Image (spheres, rainbow, N blue to C red):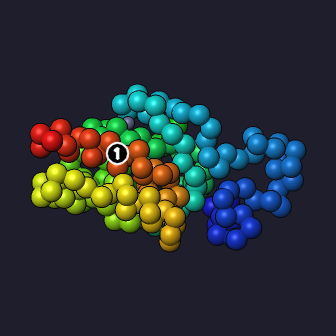
Amino acid sequence: MQFFSTLKPKQEESCCNTTDQSCDTQGDNCCTPQPKGKEPCAKCGQKAKGVLAKTLNALLKPETKKKLECLDGFFYCKTPSCKVIYFRGNTILTQKDVSVVVGLKEEASPATVCYCFGWTKEKIKEQLDNSGETNALEDIKAKMEDPGCSCEVLNPSGGCCLGDVTKAIKEIKEEIGL
Ligand SMILES: [Zn+2]
């Protein structure tokens, strides 16, 4: 019942069962809450970053979580044309396993780029269409200060969205000829 141990407050960020003495002796090898380094996606071959079990716990559909014994050690593929969202070895999770629309993937709608404060590519494009400018980055940065962000449990990447937002703005500007 390793998975259920993640629900206890003290073990929030790991699937490790601390009553298992092997944890102490094996140190870091016992469990890998966030895989270090990058791994090539099983499908597209692009380098993918590790994600925390906490992120998957917040974003995977309950039926998918039930099938997985442990949520540690997954990687996130951000390639727009690739259908893979998370993978760990031969285990591949796609949009049907995730409870939010992964905005970075092709044809995603809404194409959310900032999950904490609700910025989508659609909203950015609308601003750029209307005024040639967007306050997305300024708005996100200000709100990161206050009230603060929760990327780890809201963003499928588990990380900060600023890089993705910057890229989206650049792409939309090129698309509409700004
Ligand atoms: Zn991929």
Q: Nearer the viewer, residue 125 or 78?
A: 125
Q: Nearer the viewer, residue 142 or 93?
A: 142
Question: Is the C-beta of the residue carrying label 1 under 8 Å from the nearest atom of ligand 1?
Answer: no
On the image, the x and y values in percent for residue 58 come to 50, 64
Can see residue 63?
no
Can see residue 119?
yes
Locate residue 172 relative to residue 151 in the image: left or right: left
Quadrant of the rendered image containing residue 126: bottom left
155 versus 46 height, above or below: below
Q: Which residue is mark 1?
A: 166
On the image, the x and y values in percent for residue 87 come to 47, 42
Give the quarter the ligand 1 occupies: top left
Q: Nearer the viewer, residue 65 or 45?
A: 45
- Give the quarter of the figure containing the N terminus: bottom right
Give SS at disc 1. Answer: helix
On the image, the x and y values in percent for residue 60 come to 45, 60
On the image, the x and y values in percent for residue 133 come to 22, 53
Q: Amino acid at mark 1?
A: Thr
Label 1 crowd (10 A; few <14 / some 14-19 / many >=20): few
**Residue at the spot x=65%, y=50% of the render?**
33
**Residue at the spot x=80%, y=59% of the render?**
18
Quadrant of the rendered image containing residue 100: bottom left
**Residue at the spot x=19%, y=43% of the render?**
173
**Residue at the spot x=42%, y=51% of the render?**
161
Locate residue 22 relative to residue 87 in the image: left or right: right
- How many numbered circles does the render carry? 1
Locate residue 175 relative to residue 59 in the image: left or right: left
- Give the quarter of the figure containing the C terminus: top left
